[in-house]
Amino acid sequence: MSSPQGSVQELNKNRLLPNVKNIIPIASGKGGVGKSTVSANIALALAQTGAKVGLMDADVYGPSIPTILGISEKPLSINNRIVPVEKYSLKVISMGFFVPANEAVIWRGPMLHKMVNDFLNLVNWGELDYLIIDLPPGTGDIQLSLCQTIAITGAVIVSTPQDVAWNVAQKAIMMFDKLNAPILGVIENMSHFVCNHCGHTEEIFGSGGAKRAAERLEIPYLGGIPLDTSIRVTADQGDPVVHRDPESLASKEIIKIAVRLVDQVGTRNSQGEHRIVPVKIGAFSQPEIQIEWSDGKKSVYSPKTLRSACPCAACVNELTGERTIDPQRIPADIRAVAIQPVGRYALHIVWSDGHATGFYGFELLRKLSSSLE
C-alpha cells in the first residue's frame, strides 16, 4: 500500500499467496449437500489435467477432507512454515489435522479469522494453479474472513435439486455478491439416481432446480452429479471416485464439471482486467486521499468527507439506516493513518481519531467520488 512519505504504489491483491494463480472457494447454503465430497473430487479432477492443485479444508466445524482422502499423517513444520500433506497429487491442509477427531471446535469470530489467516500465511503452498477451499456451510465468519483477507478468483456454489436447498444456497450467492466476489458457477449434487442394474433414472430429490435457478440468476451452471453409491463408498474408503474409478459415470460427470470450471476461470480472469477496482492510492496522512481506478478515473476525497461517510455499525443504525455519527464532531484535521485492501471489494481505513471499523466498499467510494465532482 501507500507509504506516509507521499509515494503512490500499486495495490497488491495477491500479497499473501503470490504463487497461487487461482483461489476458488466451494460453498453451500446448508449442510448435507455433499460439498466436501464435491470439493475433493473437483480438486482431483483438476489435478488429473496436470495442474498443480491445493485443497484447503476450512470447514472448521466438520473437517472431513482428511477422511475423504484417506490421510492419517500430520503436516510437518519446517522453519516456522507448515508443509501441507500431499495425497493423490494434491497439497492438503485441514483443521482436522490439528483437532482430535472426537473434539468439538467451539470458536468465536476472532479465532476463526486467525485460522483463515494462518492457513493462508503459514502454510507453504508453493506454486499452485488452483487452490480449492472447502468452506463450511452458511454465510458466517470464515466466508467473510476469507473474502476480506485475499482476492478470490470466484466461488462455486453446491446445492441439491430441492427447492429448500436452493433457497438457502441463494443466501450464499447473495453474500459473495455483496463482497464483490464473482460466482464461477453452480453445481447440482445428487441430481438424479441411475440404477446399476437396469439403468432406470430416478429423480429422488427432484431434478433441475439448481440449473433453472442458475439460468434465472444468469449464473453459469457447471453441471449435475448423480446420486451414486460409489461416490459415498470411495469417500468413506479414503479414495474418491475420480481417483479410484475415473471411467465411472459419476467420475465422468465430475470431470466435465471441472472442465467447465476451468473455462469459467479463464473467462473471469480475462474479464478481470475490466473490473473496476483501485489500482493506486496516494499517500495517507495527507489533506487529500487520492485513488486511481482501473478504468483510468482518478478520485480525490477529503479525509473528513470519507470519515463522515463511514458505513460501519458504529456510525450507521443497522436497522433504520440512519447515520448516527455527528459530522460536526469530526476533527477538521482528521487523517487516514492506514489504508489496506479488503479482498476485492473494499478498503479498510484507520483514522487518526482512533476509528478503525469502517470498510469502504468500492461501489460506495465510486458513488462518493461522483457526488464530489
Image (tube, rainbow, N blue to C red):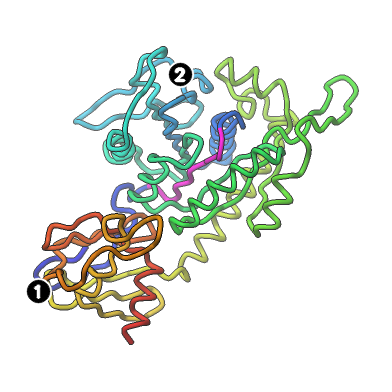
18 vs 1, nearest the viewer = 1
Identify the residue position indicated by label 1 in the image. 333
339 vs 1, nearest the viewer = 339
Name the mark on residue 71: 2
- Location of residue 253 (image quadrant): top right
* Residue at the image position 24 percent from the left and 75 percent from the top: 305
Q: Residues within 10 Å of mark 2 (few under 14, many from 20)?
A: some
- State which quarter of the image contains the N terminus: bottom left
Secondary structure of the magenta portion, mostly?
Answer: strand
Label 2 SS: loop
* Residue at the image position 51 percent from the left and 22 percent from the top: 69
For residue 280, side relative to residue 217 (left or right): left
Q: Which residues are magenta?
A: 20-30
- State which quarter of the image contains the C terminus: bottom left
290 vs 15, nearest the viewer = 290
Label 1 SS: loop
